Amino acid sequence: MQVTETLSEGLKRELKIDIPAGDLATKLEDYMADLKSKANIKGFRPGKVPVGHLKKMYGRQAMAEILSNTIQETTQNVVEERSERPALTPEIDLPEEDAEKIMAGDADLSFKMTYDVLPVFEIVDFAGFDIERPVVEIADEEVETQVADIAKNNTPFDTKDGAAEDGDRVTMSYLGKIDGEAFDGGADENGQLVLGSGQFIPGFEEQLTGLKAGDEKVVEVNFPEDYPAAHLAGKAAAFDVEVKEVAAPGEVTIDDKFAEGLGLESLDKLKEIVRGQIESQFGQMTRQRVKRQLLDKLDDHYSFELPEKLLESEFEIVWRQVEEDMKRNEKTFEDEDTTEDEAKAEYRKIAERRVRLGLVLSEIGEKNDIQVTDEELQRALYDRVRQFPGQEQQVFDYYKNNQQALASLRAPIYEEKVVDFMLELANVTDKTVTKEELEKLVAEDEEDA
């Protein structure tokens, strides 16, 4: 075998591999000898099938398998001998006309192998990174407010004979139309609405005030210009409404009995759970803010050439998501005050950052022997499976039989473990903030992202 380097520029590599036809012929003879010992063909005794007959029957199939295995093994061995780490699986160029001659044994196996190598860089001393961790102290008043909201959402309602007024719950059927045509999502047979809750389109609730059970009315409203469903935003709609029931709110006393009605042992237990939920919510926001600071500092410290094909692959993923989002929201680049070229340039920067930070985090994890355990991966798989009720087995089998899909579950776990490792060594200081301040910080991070 002969290996000739035909290109070495930056991270790009191109090699020409030549394997003599004689080597392939030897492999074919070994293959046929093994097949001869196992072949069971009508008209021949076991082990007595002539090799020429076997070649006539299975020679092309055998040679195709030999070629595939030889290219795969050679590619792997060459990379290992050169002590290089390809960013992606090397691309193999073997012209079809050459393959036919090689299959027939009339030519040497000669193919081109191209790939990008991973960049080499030093790991910075991130122990010197200063990270400020914003922490929200949960006040008793916040817990009380949340408990009061729970009580409000569990308010009992009693049917009344009179007209609906603010605070009453109206049960109704309705059918929404635009230009006389019903639209998707605009109908319900037993919809319930508490007047004054602001849950429906502006102007809808007010027109139900004064109606009684059995009343019918056409409610005319305009969808807001910023309504999430772009095909409805800013349009006038008419809803045919029939009131089925009007119910007045009852009194709720927040005490142990109320908590027991929710399946808890006491009011203190309810408050404990609510406090835990609030802490978890703000804890996730704090984590998001801290991680963003860490990644920003890494991004500031590193600037190196990126593997071109790896970058293109990441950009395609990012850009595909952009196009899908714009199509779903019925937006154009003009709506966003930009052009397609300008948007591509901006999103390419995002792809570059993601690839660069991915390589850095991967290197830090590898250098420090950070691993994702089977237990962690199994837990992530079960969490994923639970997102598809009724299809659990199909989803489970998909991930178990698809290594690339399984890797997509492993990657975020690995990233979080590397971030945890870095934060343990970085200089992290806590700063007490209000929930509004934390929300503002996270919102600014998301806007920047």
Image (tube, rainbow, N blue to C red):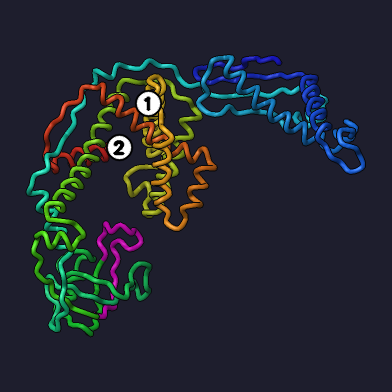
Measuring 41% from the left and 22% from the top, which residue is drawn there? 366
Q: Nearer the viewer, residue 283 or 85?
A: 283
Residue annotated with mark 1: 361
Q: Which mark is residue 449?
A: 2
Q: For residue 150, what is the image quadrant?
A: bottom left
Q: Which stretch did the figure color magenta? A: 223-243
Q: Give the structural element (helix, strand or loop) at label 1.
A: helix
Q: In whole angstroms, how far apart are the C-alphas of marks 1 and 2?
A: 18 Å
Q: Position of residue 77 (x, y in %)?
A: 62, 19
Left or right of 202 in this view: 386:
right
Label 1 with label 2: CB-CB less than 8 Å: no
- When the figure is inspected, residue 89 is found, relative to residue 182, above or below; the finding is above
**Residue 84 lies in magenta, yes or no?**
no
How busy is the neighbourhood of tag 2: few (under 14 within 10 Å), some, or many (20 plus)?
few
For the stretch drawn in magenta, the main secondary structure is: loop
Give the residue at x 35% y 76%: 180
Q: Nearer the viewer, residue 12 or 292?
A: 292
Amino acid type at image mark 1: Leu
In the drawing, does residue 73 fall left or right of residue 50? left
Foreground: disc 1 or disc 2: 1
* Rendered location of residue 113, percent (x, y): 62, 24
Residue 237 in the magenta stretch? The answer is: yes
* Mark 1: few/some/many CA within 10 Å (<14, 14-19, 20+): many
Q: Position of residue 70 (x, y in %)?
A: 69, 25
Q: Is label 2 in a helix, a strand or a loop? A: loop
How many marks overall?
2
Image spot of residue 56 (x, y percent): 87, 36
Out of 41 and 61, give the one closest to the viewer.
41
Left or right relative to 162: residue 338: right
